[in-house]
Amino acid sequence: MTNTQTKTVEFLESLVHGRFNTVQLNKKLSDFFKEEITIENNTRIRLENGDFDNEDDLTCDWKLIFNIENGTENSGFFDIYMLPMLKKGFDNEDMYITEIGYEFI
């Protein structure tokens, strides 16, 4: 892993146990990567597509995804796992980050 990739992982790990809403998280990611990042709620898409046969199939953590494919050292596939919050926080946070995953390409 390169020094740039190590700093990226450290940044992503710093998100764990944080509370955000989609706008806040997109901005935080975009500011770090210095390009527009838009997370995709993979779990919500799978719910809407009927990928879960019943409620028991639904995972506890929801999966947010984004990719960077610009040829830099940060190019890769990124997963952010979160729990939806029952009540919005002070700044309209509605998710609690539990874990991150990454694969640099």
Image (cartoon, rainbow, N blue to C red):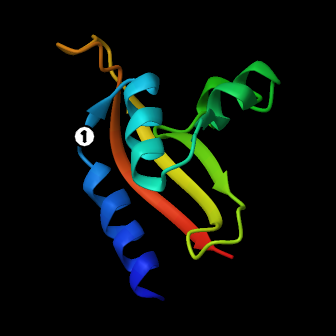
| Residue named by callout 1 | 18
Image location (x, y in percent) of residue 20: 32, 29
| Number of residues whose C-alpha sits closer than 10 Å to that of mark 1, classed few (under 14), some (14–19) or many (20 or more) | some
Image location (x, y in percent) of residue 85: 33, 21
Q: In this view, does 47 lie to the left or right of 37?
A: right
Q: In this view, does 28 lie above or below 10?
A: above
**Number of numbered callouts drawn:** 1
Give the residue drawn at x 56%, y 47%.
35
Image location (x, y in percent) of residue 102: 54, 66
Tell which residue pokes out farthest to the bottom in this image.
1
Q: Which of 2 and 57 is in front in this view?
A: 2
Q: Is residue 3 left or right of residue 71?
A: left
Q: Is mark 1 on a helix, strand or loop?
A: loop
To which quarter of the image does residue 69 belong?
Answer: bottom right
Give the residue drawn at x 70%, y 62%.
70
Image location (x, y in percent) of residue 99: 39, 54
Give the residue drawn at x 55%, y 53%.
79
Q: Is residue 102 above or below residue 30?
A: below
To which quarter of the image does residue 8 belong?
Answer: bottom left
Q: In this view, does 84 lie to the left or right of 51?
A: left
Tell which residue pokes out farthest to the front in this image.
34
To which quarter of the image does residue 12 belong?
Answer: bottom left
Q: What residue type is labelled 1?
A: Gly
Q: Nearer the viewer, residue 48 or 68?
A: 68
Q: Nearer the viewer, residue 102 or 72?
A: 72
Q: In this view, does 51 lie above or below 93?
A: below
Q: In this view, does 38 lie to the left or right of 30?
A: right
